[in-house]
Image (tube, rainbow, N blue to C red):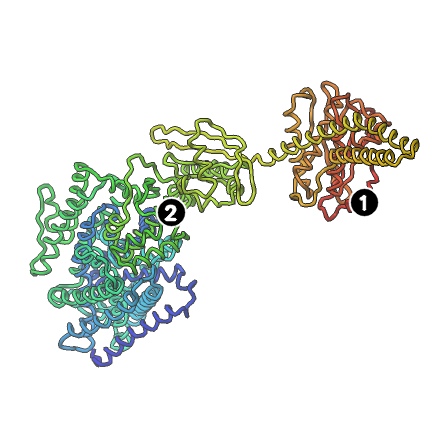
Amino acid sequence: MSTSLAGLLALGAGYLVLLLLCAQVAERGWIPARLLHHPAIYTLALGVYASAWAIYGSVEFAADAGYGYLAYYLGVAGAFLLGPVMLLPIQRMTRTYQLASLADLFVFRFRSRWVGTLITLVTLLAVLPLLALQIQTLGEAVHLLTRAASPSLLALLFCLLIAGLALAFGARHTHQPARHDALIAVIAVESLVKLGAMLTLGGIALYGIFDGPADLQAWLDGPGLITQAQTRQLDSGQWRTLLLLFFAAAFLMPHMFHMVFTETPSRRALLQTSWSLPLFLLLMAVPIPLVLWGAQRLGIDTTTPGIAYLAFALSDSPWVDTLVFLAGLAAASGTMILIALSLAGMILNHVVLVAHPPDNRPDLYRWLLWLRRALIVAVILSGWLFYRTIGIKHDLTTLGLAAFVGMAQCLPGMLAVLYWPGANRKGMVSGLAIGCTIWLLGLWLPLLAGYPALVVIPPGLESLEGTPGWYAITLLSLACNILVFILVSLMTRTSEGERAAAEACSVDAVIRPKRHSLAAKNGEDFKRHLAQALGPDVAEREVSHALEALGLSPLDGRPYALRRLRDRLQANLSGLMGPAVARDIVDRFLPYHQDPQATPDIHYVESRLEAYRSRLTGLARELDSLRRHHRRTLAELPVGLCAFGEDRELLMWNSALARLSGIAGESVIGAHCASLPTPWAELLGRMIDAGQPQLYKQAVRIGAELRYLSLHKATLAAHGDERGGTVILVEDHSEMKWLEDELVHAERLASIGRLAAGVAHEIGNPITGISSLAQNLRYDTDDPALLETAAQIQQLTERVSSIVGSLVSFAHSGRHLQGSHVERVDLHQLCEEALHLIRLARSGQDIRYNNRCPSGLEIDGNAQRLVQVLVNLIGNARDACQAGGHVEIDAQPHDGGIHVYVTDDGHGIDAAIRDHLFEPFTTTKAPGQGTGLGLPLVYNIVREHHGHIRIDSPPPDRTHGTRITVWLPRTQQDGEDSDAPDIDR
């Protein structure tokens, strides 16, 4: 088995170049985004878990521990089966707070930058053996195929090529995208290569070495039975421990955390992996025993060193060697790329930036980019260095288990993040320190020194004596870790920040931040403050990006909007430089005014409840439905409603008030009362300060229109955890005010009519006599002076008569519809308003009114004028009724318009008067009770609306009473010309 070194290098380099081309195709959009974001592609990308251990290490472990190799696949399958209760909550937190790594998550939960540094260092120490494992398989594979004298140097060459790929995937741009589609595509392709290669190798073993399943079974029952009996089997405790280690590795290893939580396309895709990823891993696991049994069938000794590479011995064909090499290269390169990208980010955010914060760097983005590039290369080279000095002396199983045991020390902290709000950083750090100390002394340092695992068995655990070192170290380190973690957390105080973060991290929790105010006044002020830390260019870009994402104006000064902007900036900066540095910068340069009386931010709480609505179940879902119903009731009230907190921050602005004011609730909710647009700041502030609970008919100019608003206030007192505040109802009484003005005007017209009638009566007769005498004087004399005097008298009397006639004409005139406000009005509502006004009068309290006008009948008209018509007609009907009488209002569509009927059961109208009712000063009432101007005014208004009016007394279907029928067109275009004769008069 000897292959040309140049050919093998060309093969490896060509494969990596093909991966780069695949990335370019995905990045340029030549592959549909729908395909790249498909859950199947994401499942294949998660196949990066199947590292070189899955190609070579599993074979070695199967030869040593039999079916124990399956723990590597079953552990991660168990983690994804628990996805809804474990992985989804972590995904929610990482997406909400822009947490890109395990260190970010721990810093967010335990509120300490040094926690992130500690997690990063532990991860680095745990990952180095795993990186060395990947590189060792590359070097050994090249050595087996080419017999090269220096496999470590060849492995270094491949490391440099892989580092170049890592730089191309994750460190080409100053601003990293939230999701690397090109990287996902490349890792998915590598998973397909691994899967195809392993299934092909299994097929070669099953049908090339054996003659199919029957022959394999015959060999297992015969010659292979002795070999299998000689293989050591794991006891149940070791099985469970391995399952736990690989379970933890599924989401704690840096490359898996990155792929599971940072690169996931959707919640649905992560849920689908609960069955698709175990299926993928099952297909990867099935060929392992076939390869092992095939090598044993060929007589290869599987107890000697190098058994991890048995797949190369299955056939002398160079194609099989190429297939095995490509499978190993695909597994190792994908794992190394993702480890380098994720671990470089952790080191940058939690070691470099913590030690050297970015103080007003003008080239911050470029500086961070080059740091990230250098760290990516450094991580891969450190893995090679570990392999060259230490890893080359150990087998794959030893390296892999050392890595997995070390990473499992973070498992108690992760479980506390999700399920134990009482945990604190002192307990977590203490437990992690104890566990890592045991792991380092027991497994990691022996790698360096070359001596066996150092295991100190405490009293009472003598059963661990004689067990594998990794098993005893795992149990002791995790037990001490958990015990110290719990004890220290229970004995020490949890800070306020940790409690708030714990509430945010708890499964299905909704955090309740306080409504603190900020020192910054608006988005422009944010830029000035952040420029001190980030520089003006970076501050401008970050604040503008956050404002655009939230849809806010740079001049928006609402406290709620500023809190949202601050949170978004902190989340964005967390993705750029880690949550610890980002929180320090935001807390330092965008501080809150700490108010001990601050209440929870109800806007934020409601937004989170809306986001979680689909996930609520049981009583929580019922309570949320009740909350939504009550809020919708308030939002859709036909009366304007707004609510303020005790600090006068606006909490609610319902739809009716938005229509009345012309101000959308989204643009003012969260603002302080004093910052509301004119005239609402002064009006609502005066209402809050007012001692009385009502303000009636306040004249307010809204836009170009003067309106009259009545305000009603309810003060909510704070009791315990219940919030206090003020609720204000705003009623628009403009139409009622205008109608009252119309009624006053009508009364004035009636007064003028009475005055005119009196003037005409008292002055008319004397003027007539004077005019007659003047005329007689002109016939009785020829004296020019007297004739001139008589003519002047005659002229003056005619002038007085003209003035009296003009006064009477003014009293009888009505307003014209032209120039009035015409709108679509509902007749049922008009009738209700008229009845409301009628009931306000003291007279007619014993009369019954029945509005049978159906809803939905609409016409074009002036609402105030039509109400005036109805008030006159219903008032006349009321006056005509006896005590206990009945007035009925009805309406029906007719002839392209609507008939409105006002019917009473009174004494009726004399036929001699009925034909003259629409003439001025005609009345059936007693002297002094009517002016005779009401129906003429009604007649004029109806004519102005192109309608007709008719009086039936008695109505055709009754023996007594009166019915007045008014026909009005549905639209003014449908009505007849206003100057046409009225045939119904």
Residue 210 seen in the current view: no
How far apart are labels 2 and 1 at the CA level? 60 Å
- Which of discs 2 and 1 lies nearer the camera? The answer is 1
349 to 770, vertically: above or below: below
**Quadrant in which the N terminus is drawn:** bottom left
**Image quarter for residue 53?**
bottom left
Q: Residue at x 23, y 77 (%)?
A: 9
Front-lying residue, 324 or 709: 709
Asked if 905 appears above or below 632 in the picture, the reply is above
- Whether residue 326 is situated above or below residue 477 in the rendered picture: below
Asked whether 109 or 792 is in front, the reply is 792
**Which of the 4 image quarters holds residue 773?**
top right
Looking at the picture, tell me which residue is in the foreground, 410 or 280.
Answer: 410
Amino acid tagged 1: Ala
The picture places residue 707, in percent across and down from the top left corner, at 56, 38
Residue for point 28% across, 73% down:
16
Identify the element where label 1 is drawn: loop
Choose between 411 and 837: the one closer to the eye.
Answer: 837
Mark 2 or 1, nearer chain start: 2
If the image is split into quadrants, where does the C terminus sit? top right
Residue 318 higher or lower than 847, as above or below: below
According to the image, label 2 marks what residue?
557
Identify the residue at image location x=31%, y=69%.
197
Task: Kindly state the secondary structure of the residue where label 2 is placed.
Answer: loop
Percent across and percent down for residue 79 are 30, 51
Residue 369's x, y, as percent?
25, 64
Image-based side of 822 in relation to 241, left or right:
right
Amino acid bearing label 2: Gly
Kindly identify which numbered label has been placed on residue 517: none
Q: Which residue is mark 1?
A: 980
Quadrant housing residue 944 = top right
